[in-house]
């Protein structure tokens, strides 16, 4: 059975504060996740054998290290499912840009196979499985914009403004581990409230470290700041700015230097995965 075009959207971190660090080294943070309409699509071909096969090509990622394959194995082992699957990911989200593409792909895989394998897990069980794959996976499982705390797993639904953004990928990938290990990273930003964020916004504590280590990101941030306040998303290389209209963002994107890639995107507080899940449930 072939089931195609399951959506896996990218996300933005509208701010990112590092407010502490646990004894095990994990950082305590506050952030807001919002989805954008830059989307990967995943096809699933359900097999009567127990094989899990990746059909898509990610040259720098071995199949056993692919979060999509790990998600499928995790669900299969947890539910003792007897089916297998062939998975093909059609990538549109830049890798290493801080947009959560891998985590989103994993979340969509868990949701899709839960439906297609008929394993009948609830959202919280799927989120628990997802958290073992990565701290960002649960927000994609819940599929709603969220205020996040802890290591990113404590989620509260939130409704930030759904702005139009110009998103820039400056052509490099950022090593998240090196950013979080940097002695220059601020780890004691005072905690804020959801209300304070909605009224005044926030910053990205990782930005200064990324600027120091990745000069192309610095150039892109400085360039975009000429048009609107620019922010880094997460610990990746992508940066974004909100514009008052899509036309204004498109006009700025036309001026983008050739060695960078620009996307005019809309913020979404509800993931397109929700609509697909409703459609699948009604047809089953």
Image: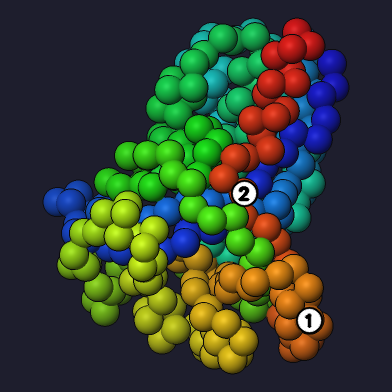
Q: In this view, does 72 lie above or below 32?
A: above
Q: Which residue is drawn at 58% across and 73% down?
A: 241
Residue 100 visible: no
> For this rendering, which residue is in front, 173 or 276?
276
> For this rendering, which residue is in front, 47 or 232?
232
Q: Is residue 196 above or below residue 85?
A: below
Q: In this view, does 11 lie above or below 209?
A: above
Counting residues from the start of the chain, the first of labels 1 and 2 encountered is: 1
Q: Disc 1 versus disc 2: distance between alpha carbons?
A: 22 Å
In percent of width and height, residue 56 lies at 78, 43
Q: In which quarter of the image is residue 73?
A: top right
Instruction: For mark 2, give the secondary structure.
Output: strand
Circle 1 sits on which residue? 251
Quadrant assignment for the N terminus: top right
Q: Residue furthest left?
A: 23
Q: Which residue is drawn at 65% across and 9% down?
A: 118
Q: Quadrant of residue 182?
A: bottom left
Q: Residue at x 65, y 71 (%)?
A: 244
In percent of width and height, residue 98 lies at 53, 62
In percent of width and height, residue 156 lies at 37, 39
Q: Is residue 248 above or below residue 162?
A: below
In percent of width and height, residue 189 lies at 21, 68
Circle 2 sits on which residue? 268
């Amino acid at each position: 059975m072939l089931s195609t075009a399951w959506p896996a959207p990218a996300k933005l971190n509208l701010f990112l504060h590092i407010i502490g660090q646990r004894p095990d080294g994990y950082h305590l943070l506050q952030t807001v996740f919002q989805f954008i309409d830059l989307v990967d699509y995943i096809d699933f071909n359900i097999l009567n054998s127990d094989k899990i096969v990746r059909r898509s090509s990610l040259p720098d990622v071995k199949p056993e290290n692919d979060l999509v394959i790990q998600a499928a194995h995790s669900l299969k082992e947890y539910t003792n499912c007897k089916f297998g699957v062939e998975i093909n990911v059609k990538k549109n989200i830049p890798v290493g840009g801080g947009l959560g593409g891998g985590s989103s792909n994993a979340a969509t895989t868990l949701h899709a196979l839960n439906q297609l394998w008929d394993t009948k897990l609830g959202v919280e069980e799927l989120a628990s499985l997802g958290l073992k794959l990565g701290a960002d996976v649960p927000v994609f499982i819940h599929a709603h914009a969220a205020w996040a705390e802890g290591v990113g797993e404590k989620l509260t639904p939130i409704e930030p403004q759904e702005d139009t953004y110009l998103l820039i990928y400056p052509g490099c990938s950022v090593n998240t581990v090196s950013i979080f290990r940097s002695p220059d990273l601020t780890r004691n930003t005072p905690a804020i409230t959801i209300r304070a964020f909605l009224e005044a916004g926030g910053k990205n504590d990782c930005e200064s470290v990324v600027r120091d280590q990745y000069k192309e990101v610095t150039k892109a941030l400085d360039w975009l700041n000429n048009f609107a306040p620019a922010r880094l998303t997460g610990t990746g290389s992508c940066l974004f700015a909100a514009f008052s209209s899509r036309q204004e963002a498109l006009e700025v994107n036309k001026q983008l230097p050739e060695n960078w890639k620009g996307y005019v995107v809309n913020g979404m507080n509800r993931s397109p995965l929700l609509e697909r899940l409703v459609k699948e449930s009604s047809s089953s």
